[in-house]
Amino acid sequence: MRVMTWRGGGTFTLDRVSEPEAGADKVVVKMDSIGVCGTDVHITQGLFPSTPPKVLGHEGSGVIVEVGEGVEQQRIGERVVLNTTSHCGACSACTTWSESRCENADLTSGMFAEYAIAPSQSAVKIPDSLDLEQAALTEPASCCLSGAEMMRIDENGIGVVVGGGIMGLFTLAFLKRRGIERMVMSEPVKARRDMAKQFGADLLHDPSEGDLVEFIKDHNGGYGANIAAEAVGQPKLVAKCVEVVRPRGQILMIGVSPEESALPVDLYDLHYREVTLRGAFGRGDVFARTPSEIDQINLDGVISGKYELESVPQAIIDSGEGKGVKFVVKPNGYKF
Ligand SMILES: [Zn+2]
Ligand SMILES: [Zn+2]
């Protein structure tokens, strides 16, 4: 089969490797779509630690074509999304943190390939109504769902998401679906603000047209927001979220701020207004139920570009330039 191997920096090679075989408790999945993630971009730019050679790609969907010993034969033909890690349910990380941090995790193979091998547990069946291309959004969506579910939902609350990329859009949708009455999207790019409406935004804020703090107060009787989520990864925008929330407000850090960055806020203000700041890194315990959650959201137009396997390097460059909302790679062709 063909795989796209990352060789360090921006260098890739398209390689032929032996056909995959499903070992015990594993499945082989013929890949339909694999999302290009900011993490893939950061790895090729040296901003996220990773050691070549390696097959990247961790947001994939496909169909089970082979099962190993111990896996039910009827799983063959099942439409699935692939979790990158399995979980034991018993270790310290599983019981005190989250199953996505399991200390005994078994990894799914890199997905920029015609086939991937995964533990049977990590191949999660998707609803019949969800198409495989959109199902490739499960992994990023699961991180947002996990984050949104960490938040306390106040009655009649107003929430704001700063940044309308894929993470901001899903965070907005899940906060709204959890019961925040009004959601605001703050985003400078018009196409992204428009997309936010589709995800449930009630109010749209363009930061080039005025300060977010004033905007929220104008729409909330002079008070700040109950929840502010930062989905860009810039410390100064996290600080803006601190400014935007009302006393006892909560901030969700979905964006990946650079390592060793400090938060430019007045700690006295955090203390005095009893503000909560919450990190949200991963898939938590929600991956398996994310496909049915995203199936409730109108995802039309979210996939903004498709690439062949040989074009992975270009897909990563285009994604890094922020050209679309989400690009997918189609290792087995555009018509699956
Ligand atoms: Zn990702
Ligand atoms: Zn575990």
Image: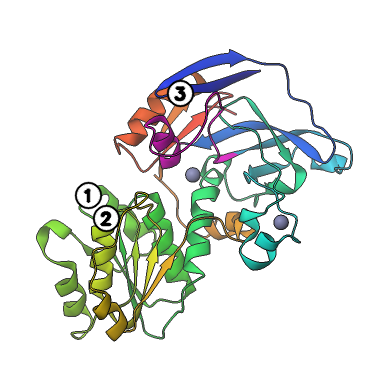
Could you tell which of marks 3 and 1 lies nearer the N-terminus?
A: 3
Instruction: Give the number of the disc on residue 8.
Output: 3
Magenta-span inclusion, residue 46? yes
Distance CA(mark 2)–CA(mark 3)? 35 Å
Instruction: Give the number of the disc on residue 193.
Output: 2
**Which residue type carries mark 3?**
Gly
**In the picture, residue 221 is in which quadrant?**
bottom left
Q: Which residues are magenta?
A: 36-60
179 is higher (above) or lower (below) than 80: below
Labels 2 & 3 near each other (Cβ < 8 A): no
Secondary structure beneath label 3: strand
Q: Nearer the viewer, mark 2 or mark 3?
A: 3
Report the front residue among 118 and 274. 274
The percent coordinates of residue 14 (x first, y second) are 53, 15
The percent coordinates of residue 325 (x first, y second) are 36, 43
Could you tell which of marks 2 and 3 lies nearer the N-terminus?
A: 3
Q: Is residue 184 left or right of residue 91?
A: left
The quarter of the image holding the N terminus is top right
Label 1 belongs to which residue?
189
**Which residue type carries mark 1?**
Val
